[in-house]
Image (cartoon, grey):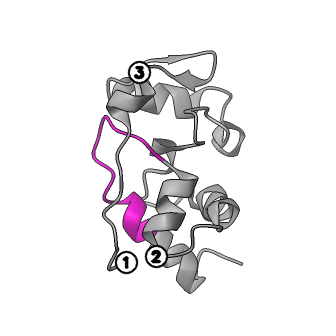
Amino acid sequence: MSQDDPFFERVYAVVRQIPEGRVSTYGAIAKCLGSAKSARVVGYAMNAAHNLPNVPAHRVVNRIGLLTGKHHFPGSNLMQQLLENEGIRVVDNQVQNFESVFWQPPMPSEF
C-alpha cells in the first residue's frame, strides 16, 4: 500500500473535509468509506500522509481521542502542537472534550 493506493486517496478525500478545530477517528473514516473493519488501513494511510500537502493527518485520532499517530510526525510534539494551534486541548496525548470536537464524516459517503 502506498500514497497512490485508491483506498488511501479516498481516505485523504475524507480527511481533507475535517474542519479546523475538529478531529475524527480512524474507525469513523473507515465506516464513511463503507469499510467499517478497515480502521487499521486508514491508520496506514495517515502514516503515509504526514508529509502530503492539504491532508490534515493531525486531525485523525483513535476512537477515544488518543494521539496514536503522533510518532509519524517530525519531532515529538508536532501533532499536539498542530491540534492546539487549532484550539483543541490535549493533555497526556489525549484530546480533551473529545465528544465536543469530534467530527462525524457524512454517511453514506461519496468518497
Mark yes or no: residue 54 visible: no
Does dot 1 land on a helix, a strand or a loop?
loop
The residue range painted magenta reads 12-24
The mark nearer the N terminus, 1 or 2, is 2
**Disc 3 element:** loop
Give the label on residue 97, or none: 3
The numbered disc on residue 111 is 1
**Residue 23 locus on image (x, y percent):** 41, 41
Q: Are marks 1 and 2 in contact (CB under 8 Å)?
A: yes
Q: Nearer the viewer, mark 2 or mark 3?
A: 3
Gap between marks 1 and 3, in whole Å?
A: 28 Å
Secondary structure predominantly adopted by residues drawn in magenta: loop
Q: Amino acid at mark 1?
A: Phe
Name the residue at 70% across, 60% down.
40
Percent of width and height locating residue 87: 32, 23
Q: Is residue 41 left or right of residue 108?
A: right
Amino acid type of the residue tagged 2 in the rendering = Arg
At label 1, counting other C-alpha atoms closer than 10 Å, the crowd grade (few under 14, some 14-19, many 20 or more) is some
Q: Quadrant of residue 46?
A: bottom right
Quadrant occupied by the C terminus: bottom left
Per the model, the C-alpha gap separating discs 2 and 3 is 28 Å
